[in-house]
Amino acid sequence: MFPFLKHRSRSVHGEDAPSSTESSVTVAATDSGGACTTLTVWRKSLLVSCEGFTVIDSNGDLIYRVDNYARTRPEELILMDKDGNSLLLMHRTKKITLVDSWGIYEAIDTNGDAKVPKCPIWYMRKNLKMNILSTKSDILAYVYSGSFDKKNSYIIKGSYRCKSCKIVHVPLNKTVVEIKRKEARTKGVRFGSDVFDLVVNPGFDTGLAMALVLLLDQMFS
């Protein structure tokens, strides 16, 4: 579907990573074996009238998509699969607050409309210190499970604007997801900041990883 990016999104071990949109979004394991999955993220909707994201695999096939009709400070975002089915719904927890905070929900698709369930499966909160210009903290945000289980807590470090971030599992101090600038294999070709790699460790849900990217984009773009 996207031949200009085909074979440029690969696992870190040099093998094509299989696409996976059926992983559980309620569990984010960090110690499964196998190669990492690298997806190419394009900060562009396939619909002309929308802003959003397009996510493809190593074969250039569409995996996830986001079509956002609200161009300024949306209160809700929906991560969809290639067919437009809602997978995850992200809802801003408060409209007026000093700290940007979102709930991540497993989408309930009703007649084509995604509805917000009562309880989020994950929370993501911007680091308050990032609002203070003098701070030197490299922690961008905190991610908690819906039950606030400390075994499932993460921090996001680095710089989203530079597309250099790591999502770290706090209890194990292990990087489970990386956001990296995409490097072209063809001489003379250079990707802008709107095209980047999302490298996901085996056992961590790629849909959840993409949801966190969407929220980073809201917090730091």
Image (cartoon, helix red, strand yellow):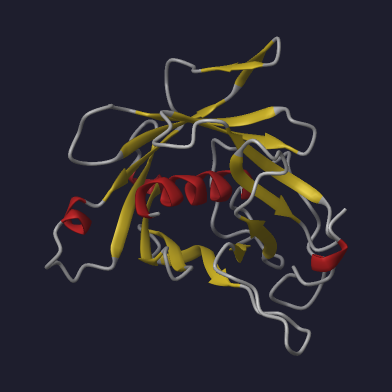
**Above/below status of 18 relative to 77:** below
* Image quarter of residue 181: bottom right
- Give the left or right position of residue 84, taking residue 60 as reference: left
User: x and y percent of residue 190 in the render?
Assistant: 66, 79
Report x, y in % for residue 33.
67, 64
Q: Nearer the viewer, residue 151 or 51?
A: 51
Quarter that holds the C terminus? bottom left
Is residue 51 in view from this perspective? Answer: yes
- Establish if 155 lies above or below 153: below
Query: Viewer-proximal residue, 27 or 214?
Result: 214
Q: Residue at x 24, y 52 (%)?
A: 127
* Residue sitting at x 54%, y 35%: 26
Front-most of residues 160 and 109: 160
Which residue corresponds to the image point at 65% horizontal and 35% vertical from the top-left?
49
Is residue 24 at least partly visible in the picture? no
Residue 86 in the image: state x and y as whole percent. 66, 27
At x 83% / y 70%, what residue is drawn? 7
Q: Residue furthest front?
A: 49
Query: Is 42 situated above or below 99?
Result: below
